[in-house]
Image: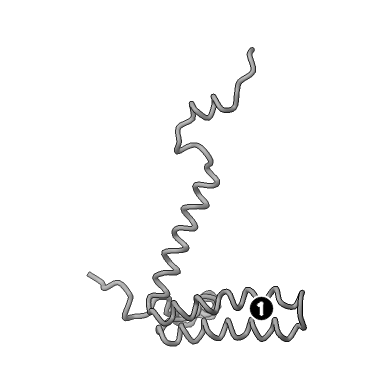
Amino acid sequence: MPPTNILNRMDQTPARERFPIARRSLRLAGAVRLNWLQRHQHGFNFALHMLGIPLAIVGLVLPFFVEWYWGAAAFVLGYLLQWSGHLIEGNDVGEMIPIKKAMGMKTVAIAPRYAPKPE
């Protein structure tokens, strides 16, 4: 039997069947992005997250280069910026939603003023 060239096999495979893991991952990433955008519709909340997320990530890396307390301060400040954004928007911080659900407490994933209206 002659050797099969992998490129020839890919040409014969329908596009929807190529790279199934990557396609599923991209679909999941798209769904996560849409959920995130729904929960951050207030402009000021969005802006605070654009500052707070990088600051918190830098706070995780800083202790490897400077004194630990600079990293801790950056992480806490970044998280506080995001938390205050959720207070302004009127919804729960994402990390608290599963905890509150497990405790049987009411959660607000999307602020009532931005929630889809029931028909």
**Residue lying furthest front in this view?**
65
- Residue 18 image point, x, y percent: 51, 37
- Residue 40 image point, x, y percent: 42, 75
Q: Quadrant of residue 73?
A: bottom right
Residue 119 falls left or right of residue 89: left
- Residue 46 image point, x, y percent: 44, 77
Name the amino acid type tagged 1.
Gly
Which residue is at 40% across, 84% downward?
A: 90
Count of numbered badges drawn on the protein: 1
Which residue is at 54% across, 47% downward?
A: 22
From this view, report whether residue 29 is shown above or below residue 40: above
Which residue is at 49% across, 87% downward?
A: 84
- Residue 7 image point, x, y percent: 56, 27
**Residue lying furthest top in this view?**
1
Which image quadrant: the C terminus?
bottom left
Q: Secondary structure at mark 1?
A: helix
Residue 119 falls left or right of residue 2: left
Which image quadrant: the N terminus?
top right
Q: Which residue, given by chain and number where applicable, does mark 1 sit on?
A: 59
From this view, report whether residue 35 is shown above or below residue 110: above
Q: Quadrant of residue 118?
A: bottom left
Q: Nearer the viewer, residue 16 or 109?
A: 16
Q: Nearer the viewer, residue 93 or 43?
A: 43
